[in-house]
Image: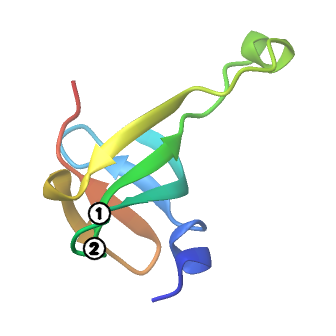
């Protein structure tokens, strides 16, 4: 699967169905070459639009449950 296809999928928490955001980048291990985590851009709040800062959350591969056709399901994040 191409990374550009992953970037189009919504990231959803499996426990409560909450939309987390979209994949913007991936963290790759130097030693193994495997993806270790996804960086997720959280949706902006209405008033957060003017701040110019984008909130980014890291989701480790161990927390990814399923990469589906349209969504990526992850375990509940703290």
Say which element carries label 2: loop
Furthest-front residue in this view: 31
Proximity of marks 2 and 1: CB atoms separated by less than 8 Å: yes
Q: CA distance from mark 2 to mark 1?
A: 6 Å
On the image, the x and y values in percent for residue 64 come to 22, 58
Q: Image height check: is 35 above or below 13?
A: below
Residue at 42% x, 81% y: name it: 69
The residue that disc 2 covers is: 34
The C terminus sits in image quarter: top left
On the image, the x and y values in percent for residue 66 come to 23, 69
The residue that disc 1 covers is: 29
The N terminus sits in image quarter: bottom left
Say which element carries label 1: loop
| 31 displayed left or right of 56 | left
Furthest-bottom residue in this view: 1
Residue at 46% x, 47% y: name it: 39
| 42 displayed left or right of 78 | right
């Amino acid at each position: 699967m191409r990374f550009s296809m992953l970037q189009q999928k919504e990231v959803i928490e499996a426990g409560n169905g909450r939309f987390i955001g979209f994949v913007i980048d991936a963290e790759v291990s130097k030693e193994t070459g495997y993806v270790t985590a996804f960086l997720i851009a959280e949706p902006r709040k209405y008033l957060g639009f003017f701040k110019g800062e984008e909130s980014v959350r890291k989701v480790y591969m161990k927390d990814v449950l399923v990469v589906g056709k349209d969504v990526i399901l992850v375990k509940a994040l703290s």
